[in-house]
Amino acid sequence: MATLKQEMGMIVVRTRILSHRWFQAFTRPRICIDGMDYTREWGVHAFEVLKGDCTVTVNYTFFLKSFGHNVAEVHVSTMEKVFLDYSVQTPLTFSTGILVKASLAEGTLWQPQPGAEQPPGKKNASQKGVILGLLFLGPLGLIPLWKSDRFSNNVKWAITAAMALITMLVISKF
């Protein structure tokens, strides 16, 4: 086991939202490292990988469509940290994201998010919290629902459709 640990390196990925891209706050970046998908919050995340060549892909989904797709090929040596910086620089929604290797000096300033070592599928909000949000906040309660990993996509769509129907009924009464 100690031999395997010595054969590992680390890839640190920083994903950034630019101020003029406010809609990205409702999305989460998808980071794919050699076929392993991780959906995380925007920020800095560290991933342990085997030494060697790695393919890193980053994009985000907005209304079931993938945007900002970009790929980087990196080489990771034993016990090395490779830093990658991802952002979308232009105000166009359909533009390609920029994924570049950052310098060691710049990367060491980044602070990884707490819980970055957790496996994919981190739970964001409790089911009770999401349901209370839907009851008391109405359509605004859909935001934590869609950010939560505790509900399947089918349930999320059913709740969204029901909330849209209820909202239309309430508005039509006025």
Image (tube, rainbow, N blue to C red):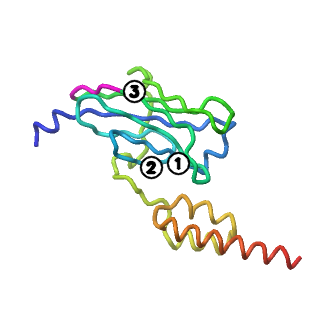
Amino acid type at circle 3 is: Thr
Residue type for callout 1: Arg
| Picture layout, residue 121 above or below residue 113 | below
The quadrant where residue 139 appears: bottom right
Rendered image quadrant of residue 50: top left
Task: Tell me how far mark 3 sits from mark 1, CA to CA.
Answer: 23 Å
Q: Nearer the viewer, mark 3 or mark 1?
A: 1
What residue do we see at 63% from left, 64% from top? 142
Q: Earlier in the sequence, mark 3 or mark 1?
A: 1
6 and 158: which one is in front?
Answer: 158
The region drawn magenta spans 74-78
Is residue 16 one of those drawn in magenta?
Answer: no
| Disc 3 target residue | 108
Location of mark 1 (residue):
28
Q: Amino acid at mark 2?
A: Thr
Q: At 46% across and 25% down in the image, what residue appears?
A: 100
- Give the number of the disc on residue 39: 2
Q: Secondary structure at mark 2?
A: strand
Q: Position of residue 98 (x, y in %)?
A: 53, 29
Q: Considering the image in quadrants, where does the N terminus appear? A: top left
Label 1: how many residues lie within 10 Å, few (<14), some (14-19) or many (20+)? Answer: some
Q: At x 24% / y 29%, what residue is drawn?
A: 52
Circle 2 packing at 10 Å, graded few (<14), some (14-19), many (20+), is some
Residue 171: % across, % down: 83, 73
- The label on residue 151 is none
Q: Earlier in the sequence, mark 3 or mark 2?
A: 2
Q: Predominant secondary structure in magenta?
A: strand
The image shows residue 167 at horizontal and vertical percentages of 75, 72
